[in-house]
Image (spheres, rainbow, N blue to C red):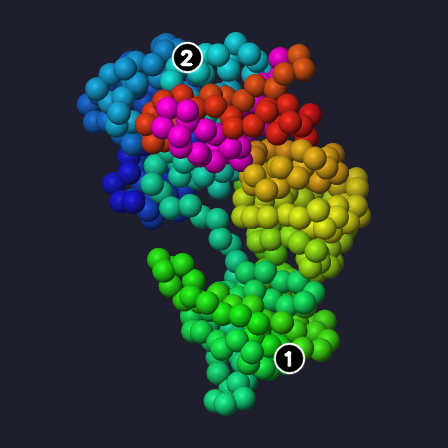
Amino acid sequence: MAGLRVVATNNVAIFRYLAAPALLRLGVSYQVVADHDELLAAVAADPPAVALVDVELAGGDGYAACQAIKRGPAGKLTRVALVLPPRGVATIDRATIDRLAASGCDDVLAPPLTADDFYAHLSQLTSLPLRRDRRIAVELEIELPATGAATLGGQVTNVGAGGVGLRLEQPLTAGTAVAARFRTGDQLSPETRAVVAWCRPADPIDGGHVAGLTWAGEVPLRTRLLLEQVALFDLADEPDDRADGRPGVTVLLHGDSTEMTRFEALAARLAGATDVTFDLAAVRYISSAGVRAWCELLAPLAGARLRFRHCSIAFASQAAMVPLVVAGGEVVSLEAPYYCDACGRDEVRLLEVGAIARDGDRILAPRLTCGGCGAPTELDDIPERYFAFLP
């Protein structure tokens, strides 16, 4: 995505995110402008892909500046995200929601937010690649009856009591009995007996194959714990980039949580933790049995400070029905389904909780523009139901 250009108003937190090495490596450049007039002049002179505009803009009004950009020559070239004041500085209300809608903005940012969530907002506005799949690559040392030992590269996509799902570089033959060892980093599982239940080509764009192994006999404990970690979670070794600077552990969840899911390895890693952030962007599916396993994981963390960031639609939908899914912790950001009536486009948009307003018993989500046709979009659900788990 070389050449992506961003213009941002003078917000220290925002241009700190823009200067992050990950964006610079992708060729993202940025220009910081001081006030309303400089913003409009910079956009008119060389329309950027994205303009990040503070609603409290020096020398003018961010809402009006957004309208001016959208109505001007750059309107079809530049996506505009309005940046709200930091949470705690101002409270978003119905009037704010109405002003956001009237501005025609394409997105809303509600600081403080993490660098990953900032990146996700840019991905929504442009064609920056999404960074969602954090699964760790594994090596499979498989002994095949006909050919002997073989080492295959792949990824573990799901783990359950009955078997394991894989993405592989090479195919396996269904019905083949194998003796497998799984290696990631310096961890190597003991020999584990399994049968290839199925194998088929993966998505033709990505290439490779997907397969399922069914366990044959009892699975060694070390194998189960290693695979559970690889398929279900990663832990950040360093303190994350929360604005408050407090140390803590960040857990990156991914994959599916079903009746076969166990969180034993994660529970062991979190024993005694007092400050935990869960990143849920890559959680694709949670069944009712998966919810039960998740709640059992959270129960021993009672009293710890818990945050839930970038809650996927799968996670948010379950939390709306079962409040124990967030265990009284703080929800920082979540995905929400949006629909454009003009062109029929469905979109998944990331929202910070600070961009969602309450008006009595009503919950008001920001109205954003469609990434396809630019028409206004609406939340594709009943707000009071979808956001029921928010305070």
Which circle marks residue 102 in the picture?
2
**Snapshot quadrant of residue 180:** bottom right
Crowdedness of circle 1 by 10 Å Cα count: few (<14), some, many (20+)?
many
Question: Residue 21 location, x and y as percent?
Answer: 39, 46
Range of magenta residues: 335-359
Tell me if residue 340 is in the magenta stretch: yes
In the depicted structure, whether residue 125 falls above or below residue 154:
above
User: What's the residue at 36%, 42% (across, down)?
Assistant: 128
Indicate the quadrant containing the C terminus: top left, top right, bottom left or bottom right: top right
Q: Earlier in the sequence, mark 2 or mark 1?
A: 2
Indicate the quadrant containing the N terminus: top left, top right, bottom left or bottom right: top left
Question: Badge 1 is on which residue?
Answer: 193
Label 2 secondary element: helix
Question: Residue 4 location, x and y as percent?
Answer: 28, 38
* Discs 2/1, front: 1
Q: Nearer the viewer, residue 385 or 85?
A: 385
Dominant secondary structure of the residues highlighted in magenta in the image: strand
Question: Residue 23 location, x and y as percent?
Answer: 37, 43
Q: Nearer the viewer, residue 21 or 61?
A: 61
- Marks counted in the figure total 2
Label 1 secondary element: strand
User: What's the residue at 36%, 28% (across, down)?
Assistant: 343
